[in-house]
Image: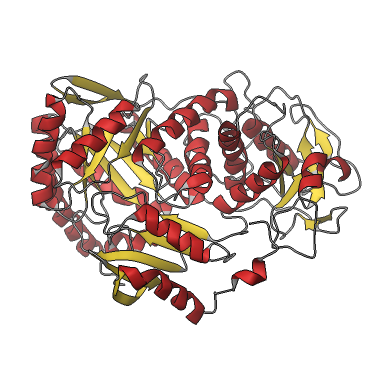
Amino acid sequence: MQFQDSPYRYQRRRTREIVIANPHQELKLGADSAIVYQSMITSDTLDTEACVKQTLDLAAVGCQLVRITAQTVRHAANLEHIANALREKGCHVPLVADIHFKPEAAMEAVKWVEVVRVNPGNYADSKKFKTREYTEGEYASELARIEEKFAPLVEQCKLLNRTLRIGTNHGSLSDRIMNRYGDTPLGMVESALEFACISRKKDFHNFKFSMKSSNPKVMIECYRLLVARLNELGEDWNYPIHLGVTEAGDGEDARVKSAIGIGALLCDGLGDTIRVSLTEDAPNEIPVCRELLAQIPALTQTECDFKDAPLSFDPFDFSRRESLQVSLPTGIHCGGKQTIRVLGTSQQTAACPPQPSKPEMVQTEASYEHSGIWEVDPRVDFQLPEELCLIAIKDELDLPVISAYRLLASCLKKKDCRYPVLLKDTFTPQDSLTSDIALLRSSVNLGSLISDGIGDAVLIRNEQDPSKAVKLAYTILQAAGCRSFKTDYVACPSCGRTLFNLQSVTASIKERTGHLTGVKIAIMGCIVNGPGEMADADFGYVGGAPGKINLYVGKQPVKFNIPEADAVEQLVDLIREHGKWREVAIMADAHV
């Protein structure tokens, strides 16, 4: 299967054009159109005034597509008033109705908005987490039932000239898909294709796909597999796709996680719309979208290709490249089964010196200048030293970082060489990048390669502040799922379904639990995003009803209807009961 023409040369995937239209505005997706950025408001959909204000705020910062939840028919019906009020104010940004569980809500929403987003995992199925074997006949019967539920919406979209987004989410697949494919990228793809087949059967083609996950590596695999499957199905399956890392959280962590997942795929040439999901005020998402898109030309190239260099990794199934273990001058081991290490420049090493006796600290684990790195140009036949060492790409090489290291991994595989590899975020260090742009560039380059399974150590040089650079290296490794130096949070960005203030609650939970290295906590505003989409979180804090919280261990609910005022402390008690709690004093001297 193939999802791109070349892993070494950038070429944007050519899709069919779809049109999102209202009487005053036409937004084109795919083909030669620029990549569109979008966001979602957080107000209650029944509060027309608040929804209009938030939409106007988003439009003012350049948001091109605004999503609004429509959880019931009543909420969907109010989209008429929201749309009318916006048009009266001269705002014609297209609106998307976000539908979960309620086909009847979709049938109402399609009357008033330009796009309807459905999640195949819960549009026609109520999830019961049941294990069951399906015969071929039973499976066919299930598909007929799904078509009966979904076809009326397709017919209305065709009649009213609407657009569909067929959006699967990791962790929210139907029991039927879970039983056949598991909670896997393949399951997500096949679930979406079932709904696409129904649309095509009705000769409706004005739709796009999305495959979202809170885990960037899973998200990357899903989109690559989707495009490969579309290519297999035929040239006329070239539908546009929307990119996003769901439940990314807030602050630097969310921006790094989003840059890894979205940026890696943009560099692969995939993506026609994007959203950077932040547990922050929605307008904050748009500048990040714009800045991330602006970095892609500098991180890719269209000139050279290396057609004779086979890919060294499976783009649809993550596995880390096999390497031998080498000892760094600090006595720390790198490569083999070791975690990915953080090397530093002399300035970074002075700011965050190696302290092998305190592995919990944010530190450089060896000096780049004093670790005997063997640097090569992978475009020419290079020699390797007899003594085992770290291999890296030479500085000032006129190649994008991602292309160069993929080529290096291919060369090392042909040589049957398992020397460990040091990843650099840039070959031409610059002192003109601001910290927010350095974060995006470093995250895209290093995160893409780590998600390909390449790399045994990393070096950050885009960020000029030595301490910030070292911390950014750890943040990228944690976001990519490689190592943990602090608590990991999965937090949805809020919407009109949310049953508590996500921003303030997330801040409270972080204040109480931010020192718990190796613990993953999911903070979900409603049952739509929990429990399924909490993925592999250890503990979950989920809105169950207004003012009431349900607590989870993994995907299992264990405490129900806890008053919100008590819920954070009860979460702490739950973490303590399961042996994951550590007192802050234990971590008092760590750089966290």
Image quadrant where one finds the C terminus = bottom right
**Could you tell me residue 305's position as x and y percent?**
62, 24
How many labels, in total?
0
Q: Residue at x 33, y 37 (%)?
A: 39
**In the picture provided, is 190 more to the left or to the right than 387?**
left
Q: Does residue 131 appear in the picture of this structure?
A: yes
Image quadrant in which you'd find residue 196: top left
Q: Does residue 110 appear in the picture of this structure?
A: no
**In the picture provided, is 339 more to the left or to the right than 219?**
right
**Could you tell me residue 566's position as x and y percent?**
35, 73
Q: Nearer the viewer, residue 407 or 333?
A: 333
**Could you tell me residue 388's position as x and y percent?**
86, 49
Q: Residue furthest bottom?
A: 577
Q: Residue furthest right?
A: 386
Q: How is the image coloured?
A: secondary structure
Q: Is residue 289 above or below residue 1?
A: above
**In the picture provided, is 362 more to the left or to the right than 189?**
right
Q: Residue at x 41, y 40 (%)?
A: 276
**In the picture provided, is 99 more to the left or to the right than 388?**
left
**Could you tell me residue 125's position as x and y percent?**
20, 60
Q: Nearer the viewer, residue 405 or 464?
A: 464
